[in-house]
Image: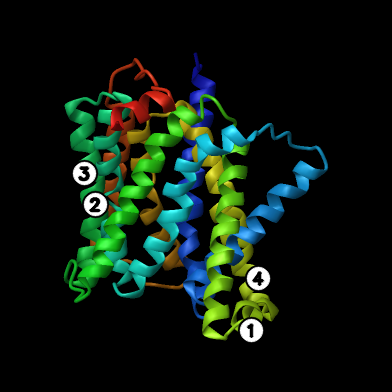
Amino acid sequence: MHNRSTNGVAYLAALSYAAILGFSFLFVKLTVTEASPLDVIAHRFVLSLIALTIPVLFGWIKINIKWRDMLRILPLALLSPLLFFPLQAFGLMSTSSSEGGIIQATVPIFTLLLASYFLKERTTALQKISLLLSVFGVVFIFVMKSGAPLASNSFGGIVLLVLSAICLSGYNVLARPLTQKYSPMELTYVTSILGCVVFNLAALGYHAIDGSMSAYTAPLVKPDYWLALAYLGILSTLVTSLLSSFALKWIEASKMSVIGNLSTLISMIAGAYILKEQLAYYHIIGAVVIIIGVVGTNFGGRKSFAPIKTASEISQRTE
């Protein structure tokens, strides 16, 4: 059983996860001007895997993974990063960032539904209302900011973004039982290896067919690109994976996913202080609603924790 101090550390990990994601949009802007979304993802995972492999080779971190473990973790890696990253990247190519933010805000709703069915997580009426409040706060900010929700002509882009949100929700749910069997480092290492191999094969294959192989390495000579890549590859890919895996070991999937909505709040503050973007009244209203929703979801429930189903039990529910 976990004690209060462990629970506190888990919440700190979840908040750190949201903070890193909140600042990542600044660095994504720096990379996409220099390289295609697929190349950026490929480079992120190369850097992420190198950063994780160095301490493993020196014996500072112990990884005890066999082939059968790789197969067990494969469905998790399939959901994120293998499906989530491309669906989000290509969805955003034909939609606005506001639309992306609105759709991303629905992740806690999908997570709540999936966790209720597969993990038997139970939430109170107050928690459900709080979760919806948090989602409403995010949607309110983006709608007020853009003036029109989902105004894009690209129905296909919106579908891709919705699918990416479902993948991230599925990841939150499937990671929870796997964290009972594997350490956060082991889960992150396997997903990083698979992400690195798949995305780099895809990027190099595309450039080989297109005859544009030099485009793969062209951004790597620019210091600004490396700075952004270091943040995205090490903090936003590697560290967030470790933090979410650790947090999901102790926090219910539905609670963890709603904390992710705080990243919108952090993005807003970062934009105001770093990019000197103007804060409007609707930012403040939305922020207050998001915070009330996150607090209500996490502290408006029962004292007992939902039993965690094993990964095999979850797979049986889908058969």
Q: Which residue is mark 4?
A: 226
Is disc 2 in contact with disc 3, using a CB cutoff of under 8 Å?
yes
Q: Which residue is mark 1?
A: 214
Name the image quarter holding residue 197: bottom right
Coordinates of residue 86 in the picture (x, y in percent): 42, 62
Name the image quarter holding residue 132: top left
Question: 167 or 149: which is nearer to us?
Answer: 167
Give the spatial CA distance, label 1 vs label 2. 44 Å
- What's under tag 4, amino acid-wise? Trp
Coordinates of residue 261 in the picture (x, y in percent): 35, 48
Among the two numbered marks 1 and 2 on one chain, the one whose residue lies closer to the N terminus? 2
Q: Which residue is mark 2?
A: 137
Give the spatial CA distance, label 2 vs label 3. 6 Å
Q: Can you tell which mark lies on residue 133?
A: 3
Among the two numbered marks 3 and 4 on one chain, the one whose residue lies closer to the N terminus? 3
Q: Identify the residue at horizontal 24%, vertical 26% (top origin).
A: 123
- What's under tag 2, amino acid-wise? Gly
The answer to whether residue 4 is above or below residue 127 is above
Residue 260 lies left or right of residue 237; in this view the side is left
